[in-house]
Image (cartoon, rainbow, N blue to C red):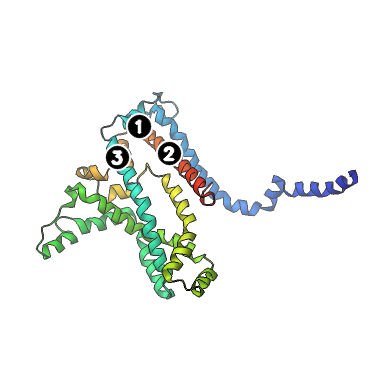
């Protein structure tokens, strides 16, 4: 028995040497060097700014700096919780995000399934290019396009209404129109890139499954229902978990540039991020940092909770 252990020992020792961190570093040094710039940038722009969390508990002043300002405990959090606008911004932020999380996947999956049925490659590339192009436009440009359409005096929509003898509608003084406008603009801008994720997943499905379904007499709808859609469920779960991280955060460009920061529209367009921005304009850095901390904590809780629920229902589709 001892001879057997001794005979195996050199092999075990060699395996330990091969898997040692130093040996791995030498063997993959060139690849790690390629990753080093990205690691450094990620550290600088994602971890170093986290030091600013101390501002949430300070009365920040420029002369004393971030680490020497007066400590005031949880007073900065009162800026949000005692605000008369709390219910409005929470309702808008959470409400819009829930709409985006439900409507977005439905539209993106529908578009991806339609594109998957296109057989002509040139037509497919044309459709993808047209739909994806808005994703690369800044919200500033999209805001000007929206204003050119909705401008009450010179906008395209107003001119169309006048041509048909209808009264012009000033949407910039009517908050009730903006939930529909914001959802429509956000969907238009993101449907191209969003559908590409699901389209790429569809392209990875084994074609033999469709061939077998055709042999069994399955219709196109049955192939979509029993093959295509089930293969998209894992991606839908992952995207839902990631989206829950931003449940208490809104896209600043969307909610600031599209309504053009018109105070009359705050009832349906004001979210946490635009509220924080107004606080920053008033040099209220401590309160803004406190709200940012709350957003991060709430996002972490929702990501963990959503992942826990999915892991209980379908462990294979959980993120971690």
Q: Which mark is residue 287?
A: 1
Which of the 4 quarters of the picture holds residue 291? top left
Separation of residues labelled 2 and 1 (CA atoms): 14 Å
Q: Relative to 180, is 301 above or below? A: above
Q: Nearer the viewer, residue 215 or 124?
A: 215
Mark 1 residue element: helix
Tell which tag, 3 or 1, sits nearer the viewer.
Answer: 3
Q: Which mark is residue 89?
A: 3
Residue 296 numbered mark, or none: 2
Kindly report the distance in space between the C-alpha atoms of the residues bearing marks 3 and 1. 15 Å
Q: Could you classify mark 1 by the number of other residues whose Cα lies within 10 Å: few (under 14), some (14-19), or many (20 or more)?
A: many
SS at mark 2? helix
Where residue 24 appears, as percent x and y from the top left, is: 69, 49
Residue 243: x and y, percent?
A: 42, 48
The residue drawn where x is 22% and y is 45% is 265
Q: Nearer the viewer, residue 42 or 171?
A: 171
Percent of width and height locating residue 49: 46, 38
Residue ID at (47%, 64%): 226
């Amino acid at each position: 028995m001892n001879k057997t252990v001794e005979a195996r020992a050199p092999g075990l020792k060699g395996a330990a040497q091969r898997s040692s961190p130093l040996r791995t570093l030498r063997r993959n040094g060139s690849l790690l060097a390629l990753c080093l710039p990205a690691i450094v940038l990620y550290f600088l722009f994602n971890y170093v700014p986290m030091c600013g969390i101390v501002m949430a508990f300070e009365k920040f002043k420029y002369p004393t700096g971030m680490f020497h300002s007066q400590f005031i405990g949880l007073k900065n959090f009162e800026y949000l919780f005692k605000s008369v606008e709390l219910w409005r911004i929470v309702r808008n932020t959470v409400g819009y995000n829930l709409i985006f999380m439900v409507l977005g996947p439905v539209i993106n999956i529908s578009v991806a399934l339609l594109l998957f049925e296109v057989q002509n490659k040139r037509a497919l590339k044309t459709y993808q290019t047209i739909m994806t192009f808005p994703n690369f436009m800044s919200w500033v440009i999209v805001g000007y396009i929206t204003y050119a359409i909705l401008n009450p005096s010179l906008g395209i929509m107003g001119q169309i209404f006048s041509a048909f003898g209808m009264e012009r509608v000033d949407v910039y003084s009517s908050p009730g129109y903006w939930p529909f406008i914001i959802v429509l603009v956000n969907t238009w801008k993101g449907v191209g890139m969003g559908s590409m994720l699901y389209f790429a997943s569809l392209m990875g499905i084994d074609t033999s499954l469709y061939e077998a379904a055709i042999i069994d007499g399955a219709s196109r709808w049955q192939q979509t229902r029993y093959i295509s859609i089930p293969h998209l469920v894992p991606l839908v779960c992952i995207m839902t978990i990631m989206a829950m991280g931003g449940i208490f955060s809104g896209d600043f460009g969307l909610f600031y540039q599209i309504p053009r920061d018109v105070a009359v529209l705050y009832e349906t367009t004001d979210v946490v991020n635009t509220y924080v921005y107004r606080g920053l304009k008033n040099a209220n850095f401590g309160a803004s940092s406190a709200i940012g901390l709350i957003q991060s904590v709430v996002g972490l809780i929702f990501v963990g909770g959503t992942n826990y629920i999915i892991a209980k229902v379908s462990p294979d589709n959980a993120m971690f």
